[in-house]
Image: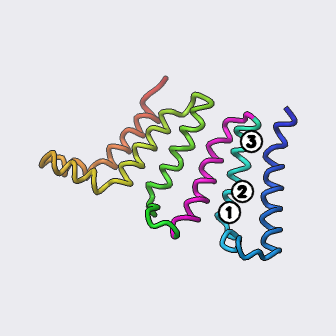
Amino acid sequence: MKQQQRIFPGMILIGFGAYFYLQQANIVLFQEFFTWPTLLMIVGLAFLGQGYGGRDYEAILPGTILVGFGLHFHVVNKLEIWPDHMGTFILIIALGFLLRYQKTRAGLFQGVLFLTLSIILLFYDKVVGWFGFIGGNVETAWEFWPIIIIGIGVYLLFIKKK
């Protein structure tokens, strides 16, 4: 078990050491990676190493989120097809829950919920267009979807008891 507890700090030290060494060496090839999103990715990769290598599956969720956010900030201004939208962050969180569910069998509901919310947010204009195609009063009901989400949250927190 002690072998598995050394994965996270070992990867952190190797990652940060390589980061600072390459920064000091001033290698032009890596110049654009000397930013805080790279540090997020290093910590996230350490969490993923602990999660998969150390069989500490709860570390998969923060690892996925940190690597995903770091990757997002690296590519958002470099790839024109990459969405710069709040739905992207929620999609990354959904991916973290689904990857953790794959190993722990816990968090499927949260993963599907975040995935659904991210799809709605990323394709909001198309979803509204579909509802417009369906008909009249749906557009008025669509304005109240945040209240519906709040209501479901209140139900899950205070009313539903297992």
Asked if residue 42 lies in the magenta stretch, the reply is: no
Identify which residue, 136 or 77, lies in the foreground. 77
Q: Residue at x 27, y 53 (%)?
A: 126
Graded by Cα atoms within 10 Å as few (under 14), some (14 to 19) or many (20 or more), the crowding at tag 3 reads: many
Q: Position of residue 57 (x, y in %)?
A: 68, 35
Mark sitting earlier along the chain (3/1):
1
Q: Position of residue 94 (x, y in %)?
A: 50, 44
Extreme right residue here? 2
Question: What residue would you read off at disc 3?
Answer: 50
Q: Position of residue 48 (x, y in %)?
A: 69, 44
- In the picture, measured across the screen, residue 119 lies left or right of residue 144, that is right
Q: Which mark is residue 38?
A: 1
The range drawn in magenta is 55-77
Identify which residue, 20 or 28, lies in the foreground. 28
Q: Residue at x 61, y 59 (%)?
A: 70
Confirm or deny contact between disc 2 and disc 1 (CB under 8 A).
yes
Quarter of the figure with residue 54: top right
- In the picture, measured across the screen, residue 102 lies left or right of residue 52, that is left
Mark sitting earlier along the chain (3/2):
2
Q: Residue at x 62, y 31 (%)?
A: 103
Q: Residue at x 71, y 70 (%)?
A: 30
Asked if residue 71 lies in the magenta stretch, the reply is: yes
Question: What residue would you read off at disc 2?
Answer: 42
Graded by Cα atoms within 10 Å as few (under 14), some (14 to 19) or many (20 or more), the crowding at tag 2 reads: many
Q: Vertical placement of 136 versus 156: above or below?
A: below
| Amino acid bearing label 1 | Thr
